[in-house]
C-alpha cells in the first residue's frame, strides 16, 4: 500500500453514493412502492458489512428525492451529491428523516433515544407527507428499548416507513419481528468478489484480490474491507500466514481495543483450524474442541464486556502449541 493510502477511512453507508450488488432487490422495492404494497416496517437482515444500511440509505434517497432536482438515478443506482435531501440528511436536518444508530462506544441503543422517535413522528414534514425512520442496528436494542420501539411502531401512521437493520449479532424480540416484513440478504462467492472489486476501486488503493484467501469470502465484503484497513500498515501477504496475522492483531488490540479486531481474530481462528484440519486429519477432534473453546471465550468476553487481554494471551499460547 502506498503512502497516499495511509489513514484511509471506510465510507459511511450514509455517504456511499454508489450501490453495488443490490440491483434486483432495489427494483423489487420500487415495484412494491409503486403498487402501494411496500411494508411500513421493513426488517433488513444479514451479516454486518453486507451493505444493508447502504441499500436502505439509497432507497430512502429514492423516496425523498423523487420530486426533487438531482433525484436518485436508477440508471446506475447512484445518489446525486447535489440533491437537497441527500445534503439535508447528511447534515442531520431533514425533517422527514430520523436516524437511530448504535455507536461503537455503546453496547445498547438507549431507551431515551428510541423515545425521541416519537417526538419526530409528531413533527411536520415538507415536500411530502412521507416520514422515514432508520434504525441501525436493531439487534443492539435491549429489552426496554425494544418495548419502547413497539410503542413507536404502534403509533406510526400509514405514510411512515421504518427500516430496521438487523446484523444478526443478537436476538430481537419476536413481537418486533411479527410487526415487520423481513428481507434476508445473501450473496454468492462470485457476487461478493464483484462487490469487493467495485468497493476497492473507490478507494484508489493497491489492495490485490489475488492476495486474499478464498476462506475470507465467507465474511461480508464490508467486513473484509475493514480487515484490510486494519492491516494497512503491513504487507497484505500476511493474510496468507494466518497464525502470524493473528499474533499481529493480538498486539494491535493491546494498543487499540477495537471490536472489529476481535471479529477479525475470530475469523482467522476459524480459517487457521480449517487449514490445520486439511494438513493433519489425525487431530481433528482436538482441533474442533480448541477452536470451539477459543471462539466461545471471545464471544462470551464480547457479550459481557469482560477484560480480553488475558484471553488473548491464552489464545496466543493455544495456537502456538497446536500440533501441526
Image (cartoon, rainbow, N blue to C red):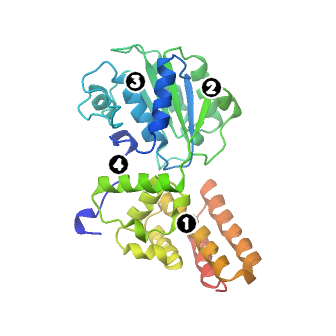
Q: Position of residue 44 (x, y in %)?
A: 55, 37
Q: CA distance from mark 1 to mark 2?
A: 39 Å
Give residue 283's quadrant in the image. bottom right
- Marks 4 and 1, how far apart in space? 25 Å
Q: Are marks 1 and 2 in contact (CB under 8 Å)?
A: no
Near mark 1 (Cα within 10 A), the count class, few <14, some 14-19 or many ≥20, is: some
How dense is the environment of label 2, judged by Cα within 10 Å: few (below 14), some, or many (20 and up)? Answer: some
Give the mark nearest the N terminus, 1 or 2: 2
Q: Which residue is mark 3?
A: 63
Which residue position holds label 2?
150
Q: From the image, tell me which residue sits under label 1.
A: 215
Q: Earlier in the sequence, mark 2 or mark 4?
A: 4
Asked if residue 120 lies left or right of residue 187, the reply is: left
Q: Nearer the viewer, mark 3 or mark 2?
A: 3
Q: Position of residue 40 (x, y in %)?
A: 55, 22
Q: Which residue matches tag 4? A: 11
Q: How far apart are the two marked residues, 3 and 2, measured between alpha carbons?
A: 24 Å
- Provide the secondary structure element on which disc 4 rests: loop
Residues at circles 3 and 2 in contact by the CB criterion of under 8 Å: no
| Observer able to see residue 123 | yes
Amino acid at each position: 500500500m502506498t503512502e497516499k493510502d495511509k489513514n484511509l477511512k471506510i465510507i459511511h453507508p450514509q455517504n456511499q453514493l454508489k450501490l453495488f450488488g443490490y440491483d434486483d432487490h432495489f427494483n423489487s422495492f420500487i415495484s412494491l412502492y409503486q403498487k402501494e404494497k411496500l411494508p411500513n416496517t421493513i426488517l433488513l437482515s444479514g451479516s454486518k458489512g453486507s451493505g444493508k444500511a447502504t441499500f436502505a440509505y439509497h432507497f430512502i434517497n429514492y423516496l425523498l428525492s423523487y420530486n426533487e432536482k438531482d433525484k436518485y438515478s436508477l440508471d446506475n443506482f447512484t445518489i446525486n451529491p447535489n440533491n437537497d435531501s441527500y445534503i439535508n440528511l447528511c447534515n442531520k436536518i431533514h425533517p422527514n428523516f430520523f436516524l437511530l444508530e448504535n455507536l461503537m462506544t455503546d453496547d445498547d441503543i438507549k431507551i431515551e433515544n428510541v423515545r425521541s422517535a416519537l417526538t419526530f413522528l409528531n413533527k411536520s414534514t415538507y415536500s411530502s407527507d412521507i416520514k422515514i425512520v432508520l434504525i441501525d442496528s436493531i439487534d443492539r436494542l435491549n429489552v426496554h428499548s425494544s418495548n419502547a420501539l413497539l410503542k413507536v411502531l404502534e403509533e406510526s401512521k400509514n405514510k411512515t416507513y421504518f427500516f430496521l437493520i438487523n446484523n444478526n449479532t443478537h436476538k430481537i424480540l419476536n413481537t418486533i419481528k411479527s410487526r415487520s416484513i423481513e428481507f434476508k440478504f445473501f450473496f454468492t462467492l462470485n457476487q461478493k468478489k464483484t462487490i469487493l472489486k467495485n468497493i476497492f476501486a473507490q478507494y484508489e488503493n493497491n489492495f490485490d484480490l489475488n492476495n486474499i484467501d478464498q476462506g475470507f469470502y465467507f465474511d461480508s465484503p464490508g467486513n473484509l474491507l475493514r480487515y484490510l484497513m486494519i492491516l494497512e500498515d503491513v504487507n497484505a501477504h500476511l493474510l496468507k500466514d494466518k497464525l502470524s496475522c493473528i499474533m499481529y492483531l493480538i498486539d494491535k488490540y493491546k494498543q487499540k481495543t477495537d471490536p472489529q479486531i476481535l471479529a477479525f481474530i475470530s475469523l482467522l481462528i476459524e480459517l487457521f483450524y480449517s487449514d490445520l484440519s486439511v494438513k493433519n486429519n489425525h487431530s481433528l477432534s482436538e482441533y474442533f474442541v480448541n477452536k470451539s473453546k477459543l471462539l466461545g471465550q471471545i464471544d462470551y468476553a464480547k457479550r459481557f464486556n469482560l477484560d480480553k487481554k488475558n484471553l488473548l494471551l491464552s489464545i496466543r499460547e493455544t495456537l502456538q502449541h497446536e500440533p501441526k
